[in-house]
Amino acid sequence: MKPFLGSLPAQNVSRETIERLELLERELRRWQAIKNLVGPATLDQIWERHIVDSLQLLSLAPEAQTWVDLGSGAGFPGLVLAIAGAERGLKVHLVESNSRKCSFLRHVSRLTDAGATVHEARLETVIPSFIGKADVVSARALASLTMLLEWTEPLLKAGTIGLFPKGRDAEIELTEARKRWTFDTDVLPSLTDSQARILRITSIESHS
Ligand SMILES: C[S@@+](CC[C@H](N)C(=O)[O-])C[C@H]1O[C@@H](n2cnc3c(N)ncnc32)[C@H](O)[C@@H]1O
């Protein structure tokens, strides 16, 4: 059993999904040696820190069909969600400005039949095309909540759900963001880090 996998709802992790996630792990280790895609210190805990940490988002939006992940990096959480959601037809758009990371994302998406769409671009230019078309927008380790809401406000206003994994400062970030917007939030526990939180944000209105 992979670390922490047992804590996830069983429907997210079929044997085929685990095999495809193992392909992602293998390719990440292979590419990391040359391309340095993730923080080297996290390589010892790829399943806990990256794969399961990403997978847990799937059960927070079980009905989602179209998902946009901003600043996907080496595929966390977006590529993991594309792999795990492929069986139920989930379409994931990965937005990443770094071309070497985009090469990795395209390579692993092809290898695993994940069907992810990689947008090699700055997210500011891509977000407008998803207004009214995305069920979920996610971003991990990309920016402060205030910055994330500034970027994603047009999506959230059109009904998209925001899922933003955050560290131990989640409440501080929420307080800061509430100076500019009113929104509904669920502050959810993380399965992989007792200090971390996942923010599910809907119904945003700006104060001005
Ligand atoms: C700290 S990494 C996090 C990567 C991944 N989400 C994770 O949690 O492992 C942030 C990523 O966002 C990308 N990025 C930063 N600003 C961006 C922008 N304006 N548009 C698209 N990608 C951006 C960077 O290239 C980098 O890969």
Image (cartoon, rainbow, N blue to C red):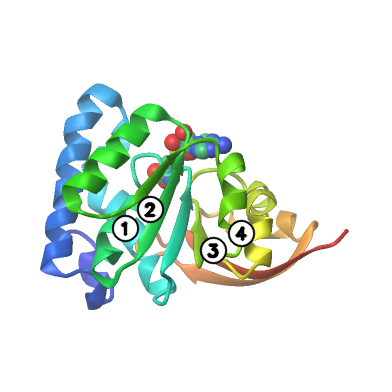
* SS for dot 3: loop
Residue 195 in sight in this render: no
38 in relation to 203, above or below: above
186 in relation to 21, above or below: below
Proximity of marks 2 and 1: CB atoms separated by less than 8 Å:
yes
The span from disc 2 to disc 1 (Cα, nearest Å) is: 6 Å
Q: Label 2 belongs to which residue? A: 78
Image quadrant where residue 35 sits: top left
Q: Position of residue 17 (x, y in %)?
A: 18, 62
Q: Position of residue 119 (x, y in %)?
A: 44, 42
Q: Label 3 belongs to which residue? A: 133
Query: Left of 199 or right of it: where is 87?
Result: left
Mark identifier at residue 112 = none
Q: Label 4 belongs to which residue? A: 131
**Dot in front, 4 or 2:** 4
Q: In the image as oriented, which residue stretches furthest toward the right?
A: 208
- Whichever of callouts 1 and 3 sits on the residue coming sooner in the sequence is 1
* SS for dot 1: helix
96 in relation to 187, above or below: above
Mark identifier at residue 82 = 1
* SS for dot 4: loop
**How dense is the environment of label 1, judged by Cα within 10 Å: few (below 14), some, or many (20 and up)?**
many
- Whichever of callouts 1 and 4 sits on the residue coming sooner in the sequence is 1
**Dot in front, 1 or 4:** 4
Q: Position of residue 110 (x, y in %)?
A: 22, 46
Three-letter amino acid code at disc 2? Gly
The span from disc 4 to disc 3 (Cα, nearest Å) is: 5 Å
Does label 3 point to a residue whose CB lies under 8 Å from ligand 1? no
Proximity of marks 4 and 3: CB atoms separated by less than 8 Å:
yes
Residue lying at 24% horizontally and 77% vertically, measured from the top left: 11
